[in-house]
Image: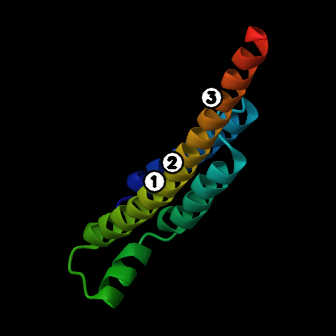
Amino acid sequence: MSTRAHILTAIAGVVMTLFILRLVGRQQLRSKYALLWLTIGVLALPLALWPNLLVEVSDWFGVAYAPTTFLLFAIAFLLLIVIHLSRELSQVETNLRSVAEDLAVLRASVETENRR
């Protein structure tokens, strides 16, 4: 990658970090998710600081084209995020069902009391 690309990567990392912190400050993003994205930013920072790191990692994995390695790691990371969010969504749906059932019982109880 060229020096210009590395500078652009570093700037994008800083902008992403500031954006994540802004979302947390406005309470639009929970801190556990902010920590996840900030960790990814920190892990991507070496790619901007050491130009040949991705090439060396690709050589170590036996990948001929370095951007393929980056895309492979990005896809694996996104897959893990999707699995994690699916798990969280399942828990939310279970909790929502429980709350809805409790509300239905409570409403039935209130209606029974009002009829007396």
For residue 104, which numbered disc appears in the image?
3
Q: CA distance from mark 2 to mark 1?
A: 5 Å
Q: Residues within 10 Å of mark 1 (few under 14, many from 20)?
A: few
Is 71 left, or right, of 7 in this rendering?
left
Residue reaching furthest to the front: 116
In the rendered image of this protein, does residue 112 appear above or below residue 73? above
Q: CA distance from mark 3 to mark 2?
A: 22 Å
Q: Secondary structure at mark 1?
A: helix
The residue that label 2 is drawn on is 89
For residue 101, which numbered disc appears in the image?
none
In the rendered image of this protein, does residue 112 appear above or below residue 114? below
Q: Residue at x 38, y 83 (%)?
A: 56
Q: Nearer the viewer, residue 75 or 103?
A: 103
The disc labelled 2 sits on which kind of residue? Leu
The disc labelled 3 sits on which kind of residue? Ala
Residue 17: x %, y % from top left? 62, 46
Q: Residue at x 57, y 45 (%)?
A: 92
The disc labelled 1 sits on which kind of residue? Ser
Dot 1 or dot 3: first in sequence order is 1
Residue 94: x %, y % from top left? 55, 48
For residue 86, which numbered disc appears in the image?
1
Q: CA distance from mark 1 to mark 3?
A: 27 Å
Q: Residue at x 39, y 74 (%)?
A: 54
Q: Residues within 10 Å of mark 2 (few under 14, many from 20)?
A: few
Colouring style: rainbow
Q: Quadrant location of the N terminus?
A: bottom left
Res. 10 in view = no
Marks 2,1: beta carbons within 8 A = yes
Marks 1,3: beta carbons within 8 A = no
Res. 61 in view = yes
Dot 3 or dot 2: first in sequence order is 2
